[in-house]
Amino acid sequence: MIDKNSDGIPTSNKKSRWSAILLVGIVILGAGLRLYQLDLRSIWFDESMSIRLAQFSFVEMFQRMREDIHPPLYYCILKLWRYIVGDSLFMLRAVSAFCSTVSIFLIYWIAKRVAFE
């Protein structure tokens, strides 16, 4: 018997358990690949610009971002992240690694919803 979850997507307990285990494995592998030797290379120009913007106060950061074409959310996240965990190269790059790791789960979720609609 095939059950449906709250979204109306057909699932079976065994199949959904294996897909959850597979998803967790892929996310862990993705995180490992993103974090492996994250701070090995020196800072690139675009990274240095982002780090520099995150060092300013919020007011000055937004004033300087008026000249930038990129949306401000990343800079705000980077500033808060830097305040919480510090400013080592590994930790500053970990923001992007974390966001891209979360995107693995989001892509899976979107694909699952699209496939069963």
Image (cartoon, helix red, strand yellow):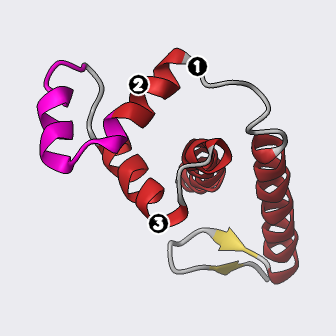
Q: Work out whether residue 75 or residue 55 is closer to the camera in this orientation and state it.
A: 55
In the picture, the quarter occupied by the N terminus is bottom right
Residue 4, x across and y down, in percent:
62, 78
Residue 80, x across and y down, in percent:
38, 58
- Labels 1 and 3: the sequence-earlier one: 1
Query: Answer yes or no: do the residues labelled 2 and 3 have beta carbons within 8 Å?
Result: no
Q: Which residue is drawn at 85% across and 69% down?
A: 21
Q: What amino acid type should be assigned to the residue bearing mark 1?
A: Trp
Q: What element carries label 3?
A: helix
Q: Which residue is drawn at 60% across and 54% down?
A: 102
Q: What element carries label 1?
A: loop
Q: Work out whether residue 62 or residue 17 is closer to the camera in this orientation and state it.
A: 62
| Relative to 2, residue 95 above or below | above
The range drawn in magenta is: 53-68
Query: Answer yes or no: do the residues labelled 1 and 2 have beta carbons within 8 Å?
Result: no
Q: How far apart are marks 1 and 2 (CA)?
A: 9 Å
Q: Which mark is residue 44?
A: 1
Query: Answer yes or no: do the residues labelled 1 and 3 have beta carbons within 8 Å?
Result: no
Q: Residue at x 53, y 50 (%)?
A: 87
- Please indicate whether residue 39 sits to the left or right of residue 44 in the image: right
Residue 84, x across and y down, in percent:
46, 66
- Residue that mark 2 sits on: 49
Q: Residue 75 occupies which quadrant of the picture?
A: top left
Q: Residue at x 48, y 26 (%)?
A: 48
Q: Is mark 2 on a helix, strand or loop?
A: helix
Magenta segment, principal secondary structure?
helix
Q: How far apart are marks 2 and 3 (CA)?
A: 20 Å
**Is disc 2 surrounded by few (<14), some (14 to 19) or many (20+) residues within 10 Å?**
few
- Labels 2 and 3: the sequence-earlier one: 2
